[in-house]
């Protein structure tokens, strides 16, 4: 193995651990609000892309229709999003956050920022500007791959599950 490959593997592991820990704190915060992480992921997507359709969310998140419907039902019942159909297009179901849903997203991101500030304060040699710049460069590189290649090794869209794996990275059966 090359040193470059080893460094990329190390980066992948570090990013995975960071996100795992942030999500651990997020789950705790969400449980206090009576919300699951899966529902929050949908709420966050609706909040960032509103108004949006169920079909568009399915594509962006790689969720099965039945799974998404159950999550959306819970968000509607909790009073976090609005759901409707247009008279001109009865087939599509549209979603948008309401003020309560937008406020919850804001609170979650504020809480996560608080946790990150606490973590950054623990690192004496952490250069936050350089870290943000490097992570943005990584994100931009990933976006270029999605735009230019558009497909993964197994022919699946890069924006959804690919490489014979589901959206959580586990190998698909069959």
Image (cartoon, rainbow, N blue to C red):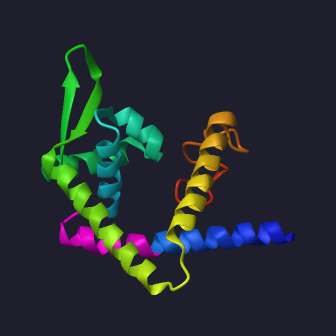
Residue 99 visible within the image: yes
Please identify the quarter of the rendering in which residue 51 is found.
top left
Q: Magenta stretch containing residue 167, yes or no?
A: no
Residue 135 placement: quadrant:
bottom right
Residue 167 sits above or below residue 114 on the image: above
Q: Residue furthest right?
A: 1
Decide whether the magenta segment is chiefly helix, strand or loop: helix
Find residue 90 and report its horizontal and vertical position in percent.
25, 20
At a point 24% along the width and 57% down the height, the residue shown is 106
Q: Position of residue 67 (x, y in %)?
A: 36, 49
- Magenta segment, which residues? 21-36
Q: Position of residue 126 (x, y in %)?
A: 54, 78
Q: Nearer the viewer, residue 170 or 159?
A: 159
Query: Is residue 163 left or right of 70 when viewed as pictured?
Result: right
Quadrant housing the N terminus: bottom right
Q: Is residue 44 placed above or below 60 in the rendered structure?
A: below
Of residues 119 and 42, the one nearer the viewer is: 119
Residue found 74% across the figure and 71% down from its top: 7
């Amino acid at each position: 193995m090359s040193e470059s490959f080893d460094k990329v593997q190390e980066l992948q592991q570090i990013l995975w651990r960071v996100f795992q820990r942030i999500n651990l704190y997020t789950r705790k915060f969400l449980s206090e609000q009576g919300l699951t992480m899966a529902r929050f992921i949908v709420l966050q997507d609706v909040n960032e892309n509103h108004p949006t359709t169920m079909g568009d969310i399915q594509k962006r998140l790689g969720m099965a229709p039945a799974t998404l419907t159950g999550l959306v039902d819970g968000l509607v019942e909790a009073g976090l999003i609005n759901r409707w159909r247009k008279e001109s297009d009865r087939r599509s179901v549209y979603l948008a956050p309401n003020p309560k849903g937008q406020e919850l997203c804001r609170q979650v991101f504020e809480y996560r920022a608080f946790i990150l500030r606490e973590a950054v304060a623990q690192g004496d040699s952490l250069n936050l500007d350089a870290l943000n710049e490097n992570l943005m460069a990584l994100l931009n590189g990933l976006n270029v791959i999605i735009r230019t290649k558009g497909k993964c090794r197994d022919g699946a869209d890069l924006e959804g599950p690919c490489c014979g794996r589901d959206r959580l990275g586990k190998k698909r059966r069959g």
